[in-house]
Amino acid sequence: MPITAHSHVRFLPTRWSLILAANAQTPGARRALDDLLRIYWFPLYAYLRRRGHAPDQAEDLTQGFLADLLARSDLAALSPAKGKFRSFLLAALTHFVSNQRDHARAQKRGGTHALFSLHAPPDAESRYALEPVDTLTPERLFERRWALALLDQVLATLRARYAAAGQSALFDTLSPLLTGELTQPYAQLAPTLGLTEPALKVAAHRLRKRYRDTLRAHIAATLPEPASPAQIEEEITHLLNCL
Amino acid sequence: MPHCPHCRAALPADAPAGLCPACLLRRGMETDTLQSFTSAWTPPTPDQLAPLFPELEILSLLGRGGMGAVYKARQKSLDRLVALKILPPQLAADPAFAGRFTAEAQALAKLNHPHIVAIHDFGTKSGQWSVVSGQTSGQSSVVSGQTFPATPSAPADAPPSLTTDHWPLPYFVMEFIDGPTLRQLLAAGPIPPHQALAIVPPICDALQFAHDHGIVHRDIKPENILLTKTGTIKIADFGLAQLITQDSALRTQHSLAGTPGYIAPEQLRSDHCPPTTDHSTDHRADIYALGVVLYQLLTGEMPPDPLLPPPQKITIDVRLDDILLRALDADPTRRYQHATEIKTAIETFLTTPRPPPPRGGPTVPPPSLEQSPPNPLHVPALGLRFAAGINLLLFFLYCCFTIFVAATTHPMIAKLDPRSLPTSTHSTTQPAYIVEYVPRHLSVTLLPLLLVAILGLLPNAFVFGASLDLARSRRYTRCILGCLLAFLIFPANILAIPFAIWSLILLSRPAIRDAFDRATTGNIPTTPPAHAASTPSTAPNFFQSLLSTLDFLSAGIVGCLVANAILWLTGRLALWVPIVACSLTDALIFYRARKIQRRRPLPTLLPGFPTTPAARRSLALGIAAHATIIILLALIPLFLQPHLLSVYAVWGTPLPAALYTLSRVSLLIRTTGIVLIPFTIAAVAGALLLAQILGGPTLCRILSRALIAIYLIFLALSLYALLQPLSINY
């Protein structure tokens, strides 16, 4: 089954500025925001860890922050047109953590609050342990993790698109093309996928194009409206520098 | 630690899907060049370069791309600004590079052309220079691109201990262009078509010049096309793509020179072919890329898919689509074979209203279907013409027959038989007899004949004319009308209907319609770009032009409406008012039309307003006919109405005769309901004039004639009504 334009639409993220413009109150907008936050859970967690929070605390804070964000009713007042989602999340998290510190002090005098699991991946800490031990600042680490999370999500989305069309094998074979060349020539690969060599080349070309489109769409989703190609390039350059 | 096979950087442990994150991000850039391995390399800062180039004062880093980095510099000896381009030092790892670099640079230096960025100097610097790392990747102060092996397939786990600061640094000193790139222009907003078309011919010149010298650019894209402050086009980076991808170490990895989107399909197809068998990409790849640039300039977008031309978008003119289609043809043999052909095609498009089909190379088959010699409309047109011809012949015979019968059998006409006269008080030789009876009997016999002839001949003649247009693919509306009329032309419609349906089906096809558009647009002279730039000054005249358009519309209608209102209010005495008013307003219209005809340069009144002299002449003629016919309408009854003449003869003075005529005509009009006709005619005329003004020259010509035909019918009806016997006592 070919991948149609319709399925393409479904796999694209909703722009965060649009979500906020809908005041995040409608179920659809809330779900879209939830999806968007899910992608960037780990960068937030890594940031808090690098800030010196213990694993449990960092997880609690991240979850609390996201729950708080989702429950807020004044999101529209944040004027998303002025900022990037990345900067917004980082600023909001910093703000939340400092508030939470005051709050926690108050709660020592009798208050309790229930924590609930929200988006926490089970391997968060083991992933964090992989971070190179170097002198990256928490902000820098956040942005690096952000870039990686974005790429993870783009690849997962793209893979899901191909899987939806029953072309997982094709995607897995061709995905190395996204960063280089294939180890085997097309002529050898084509029969294993049941394709002709020209068809495989066309598929490779399409994969590159779809990947680029998906990546740019995901980046555009985190940028203020309207995201021009130049802004997207700028963001890519920024993320490149963060790696 | 594993390394990225592409940029040689160490892969982080949690790289997404095991792929290099930096390369993944770079792939998302629009300006990503396939051999972007070089972008893993961080260009040195001006300060770092300064010791290597004592003869230059390096001012700033202008930009970097897949091909290296460009600095703005001042040449101290000549005190001029130059651009210093340094190529990625990894290139120099190939021992064969030096020789090829020299040969290529000398070839590039020969490209002395006003539209090619000139090369002042080139060379290789091998001094010590420190490198700033873009990414530490665990080990500090080492460039991520350091581990560049000679054989790319070898795993990079054990990199040779070679650092970039030992490698020589290839560089070019080039002409400094102080202006934006085409990419920056495109980003700033849409480029007007005439400007876009003015940009392309110099590029063609430059490309042709280079191709003649055996140099293919291989990476034509908006980033490489610069505009000086005076608006001169300059192409940069000639041959660099080829120079870099010929690097034997890179060949298998990066066999594609160019940028995605601008790469010709045959280059994609020849992917993985060994270099020795790679004959399929040549200078025509540049022509493809130029086609992409032109498409982008005209539409602001990339062509839908480089593998799936043709462009589906109607851009500005179908002829431009032809140019794009041919430049973007997937098959290089069907593409323009030389850059100058594109230039010729564009210039032909700009200068001639209806160019001969832009077929440059004699060996190239025509790419588009609708221009090929067999016109699919030819056969149905022939059928329609045959049917209409038969009908015309039949009607002619019928008319002849009727006249013959009338002439031979009707006593009044045949013999002017006095016995048939109602009163035998006059002799047949007396003038009163002729005056009184001949017209009456003519009206009985010939007027119906005239009506039949008009109603029968006109549609047939129209169908006949439309079939001629059909065969020549012009006047689309007229062809449609002709096909519809063909359903009605009894008796030949039995023959004509199948052909009419056939034609209508063909006419509904977009390709056929395009062919018509091409023929029609050819009628309107294309405004040359220089002139188009000055046309915005006519924009403030919109209301003025709207007013003058309304004149046309309103004069006829208002004149008739007012006159008829007066007629109804005052009765018979004002009968002459509508006719005079109509004539006056028509004269006004005629005057306006002539005035427009004389004015130069012609303002574009409304979209589609007939701007060609022929169209305006026919508009003026139509209106003149309108006036003439109305005047005749007023005068003819005086001569054809025998009673009026007899009264005139009896009374002998003009005034009572006029009064009598007034009362007589007024009564006639009121009794026959003929007063509605001016209203109808005025409305129809208004609608026709509107269509005339909005529908362009073809419709204008058709409707001018239709207007005349309608007034002829009106005349006939009025005459018929006037000549009907009435029981009036006078």
Image (spheres, helix red, strand yellow):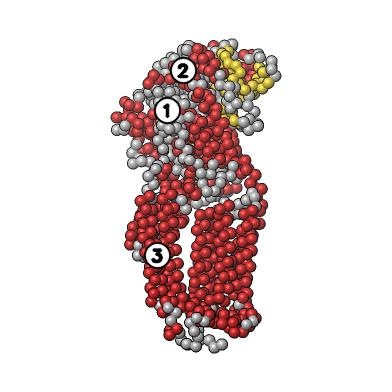
**Nearest to viewer (mark 1 / mark 2):** 1
Whole-percent x, y for residue B81 in the image: 66, 22
- Tell me: B173 left or right of B270: right
**Do badges 1 and 3 share one subunit?**
yes
Q: Looking at the image, is mark 1 or mark 2 earlier in the sequence?
A: 2
Q: Looking at the image, is mark 2 or mark 3 earlier in the sequence?
A: 2
Q: Residue at 43% x, 84% y: name it.
A: B420
Q: Residue at 49% x, 21% y: name it.
A: B214
Instruction: Give me the C-alpha separation between circle 1 and circle 3.
Output: 67 Å
Q: Amino acid at mark 1?
A: Gln
Q: Which residue is mark 2?
A: B247
Q: In the rendering, which numbered label is found on residue B396?
A: 3
Q: Nearer the viewer, residue B501 or A105?
A: B501
Q: Amino acid at mark 2?
A: Asp
Q: Looking at the image, is mark 1 or mark 3 earlier in the sequence?
A: 1
Instruction: Give me the C-alpha separation between circle 1 and circle 2.
Output: 17 Å
Whole-percent x, y for residue B55 in the image: 66, 14
**Nearest to viewer (mark 1 / mark 3):** 3
Whole-percent x, y for residue A132 in the image: 50, 24
Q: Residue at 59% x, 30% y: name it.
A: B233
